[in-house]
Image: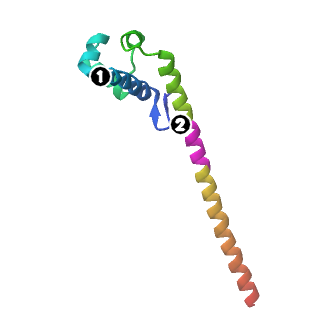
Amino acid sequence: MSNTYGQKNIREIIGQRIKSSRETLDWTITRCAKELEITQSYLTQIEQGTKSPSLEVLQKVRTKLNVDLNEIISGSLEHVVKDQILDYQHSKVKRMEKAIDGIEKLSDEIKSIIKETKKR
């Protein structure tokens, strides 16, 4: 099962939240990676959403960055659900626009047939 929904996936959202928390503390990638005891490369991948943080790293994020993991995870899921709803609504609107276009074309054809019939 894919964890991609809407515009972003859960990894990207969690990564953005970790990056935001790091930036709030005015920590560089280097400092944060040292505090979390991970490589700069791994932290960059987490922040970019290309890698998922391990549970151990999430635990360190919680303590070192003073972040509420429930907020990160539930907020991420909430964002994903909102994206799903918006995507669904957008697809419904597109289908309705196509249906309206079809009705308008049909209406124009009916008007043309009526006009031709009156001429006879």
Please state which of the two labelled residues, at mark 1 or mark 2, is closer to the viewer: 1
Name the residue at the front extreme. 25
Q: What secondary structure is marked by label 1?
A: loop
Q: Nearer the viewer, residue 75 or 39?
A: 75
Identify the main secondary structure in magenta: helix
The residue positioned 49% from the left and 28% from the top of the image is 3
Coloring applied to the structure: rainbow
Label tally: 2
Q: Position of residue 12 (x, y in %)?
A: 41, 29
Taking the spot 29% from the left edge, 16% from the top edge, the residue there is 32
Q: Which residue type carries mark 1? A: Asp
The magenta-colored residue range is 84-92
Q: Is residue 71 left or right of residue 118?
A: left
Task: Identify residue type, mark 2.
Answer: Asp
Q: Residue at x 37, y 15 (%)?
A: 65
Image coordinates of residue 22 in percent, x first then y, are: 34, 21
Q: Residue at x 68, y 79 (%)?
A: 112
Q: Please name whichever residue, 116 or 82, is drawn nearer the observer in this view of the structure.
A: 82
- How many residues crowd mark 2 within 10 Å: few (<14), some (14–19), many (20+)? some
Q: Is residue 108 left or right of residue 1?
A: right
Position of residue 82 measured from the top left corner of the image (x, y, whole percent): 56, 35
Residue ID for mark 2: 83
Q: Quadrant of residue 54?
A: top left
| Mark 1 lies on residue | 26
Spatial CA span between label 1 and label 2: 30 Å
Whether the magenta-drawn stretch holds residue 9 is answered as: no
- In the rendered image, residue 87 lying in the magenta stretch gets the answer yes
Query: Would you say residue 23 is visible in this rendering?
Result: yes
- The quadrant holding residue 103 is bottom right
Residue 108 vertical position relative to residue 30 in the rendered view, above or below: below
Residue 15 placed where, x, y %? 39, 25
Crowd around label 1: few <14 · some 14–19 · many ≥20 (10 Å): few
